[in-house]
Amino acid sequence: MRARSNCADVSNHLFIDRYRSFVLTDLQDQATTHIHELGARARRAASVLAAASTDVKNNALREAANALRKATPELLAANDQDVAGVADDKPDSYIDRLRLTEDRVAAMADALDQIAALPDPVGRVLATFDRPNGLRIERVTVPIGVIGMIYESRPNVGADASALCLKSGNAIILRGGSESRHSTRRIVECMQAGLTAAGLPADAIQAVQTTNRDAVAAMLRATGLIDLVIPRGGRGLVELVRDQAKVPTLLHLDGNNHCYVHEAADIDKAIAVIRNGKLRRTGVCGATETIVIDRTVADRVVPKLADAMPDCELRGDAEAVKLDSRLKPATEADWDTEYLDAIAAVKIVDGLDEGIEFVDAHSSGHTDAILTEDAAAARRFMLAIDSAIVMHNASTQFADGGEFGMGAEIGIATGKMHARGPVGLEQLTSFKYLVHGEGQIRP
């Protein structure tokens, strides 16, 4: 009996394993089919959008902005569903990124109007030159094609990314986080209403309709359908995209951002800038995470910093903790952490050279700042630090496409190819060459 029971157990395990394999394969196939359907529709829509006039695109944006304003009650109700579905153990900063308010919906709509008012990035002649054989060559901006946007938490990213792609002539496929799916669905409906009102195909803006994570992998493999994938989220998401993508990517890494207080800083000004950079909104990628202080002014800066930021947990090196007992001891891991919370690390350094060395070693290449009244020191720091954005006497929370006059941004690119810093309209175009002849043939 025991032998037959063991055989039955083995048989059952084999059946279960085969069933699981079948189910997993089926789910993967469904996700791939779904992404391919979205991609095929997006590519057809992209060809229409690429030829659309500036007036038509602007009309679509303004109509979408009006749709967002009218749908505010429904959008807030959908967002309440998303917030209610989030686990209780999520930090306040996570909930803040997810939550929409009347003001935030109004800001989304206003951003669409601002993007409509910006110059059209498509069709600009970047250069012209004539060849000795009579050929006249133009380099002209064109849309990239179909953009895949993968992002977490913040539902307003969907509106910003859609608007920027619409204006730059690109179709977009949005894959927001499952935690914001109800908000994303309503936002996409409003954007599609704007497209339809302007006579443009609604498929130019689509959202992935499944929470199956295999959809992300399918997007990363959708060569020939998706031209560029842009991830916006935590390090885990970005590294997944970087390691698995078979289509080109534009990476947005985490924001381990530094404020360096130089010995020639106006200390009161520096404290105000640091507080804003850290605490205005702790959950955004432009938030300050590490405060670096010159030793010559540390005894004045550290206590004032603790006074000004009682609502922030400060973790300092041994020297900083000695200067103010309100600081907790930092670990080595703190220098490389993006907290996205009311926590900041404090490091004391011996002058500008050591400050540059420390920031360069630990920055994620997103945004770093120097606080000083010494213009020469500021210039040296700004040229030496190899980050996408480097600031002088300004909050790191200005690392935002809207604040740069771009209307909005699709992300902050931390790489060095194609685009770097806030990715706006200009960065969502490529170019091609138009060659004009009069019958020339090559000898």
Image (cartoon, rainbow, N blue to C red):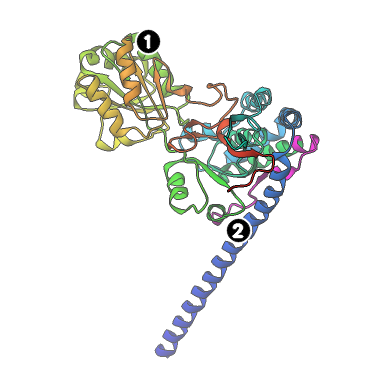
Measuring from the top left, give residue 72's x and y in whole percent. 70, 30
* Residue receiving disc 2: 31
Instruction: Mark yes or no: residue 328 visible.
Output: no
Q: Earlier in the sequence, mark 1 or mark 2?
A: 2
Q: Name the image quarter holding residue 29.
A: bottom right
Q: Is the Cβ of the residue at disc 1 closer than 8 Å to that at disc 2? A: no
Q: Is residue 129 one of those drawn in magenta?
A: no
Measuring from the top left, give residue 356's x and y in whole percent. 27, 25
> Above or below — where is 222 with respect to 417?
below
Measuring from the top left, give residue 107's x and y in whole percent. 63, 24
> Above or below — where is 368 with respect to 197?
above
- SS class, disc 1: helix
For label 2, the crowd category at 10 Å Cα-Cα, with few meaning under 14, some 14 to 19 and many 20 or more, is many
The boundaries of the magenta stretch are: 194-214
In the image, what residue occupies the spot 24% across and 16% down? 298
Amino acid type at mark 1: Lys
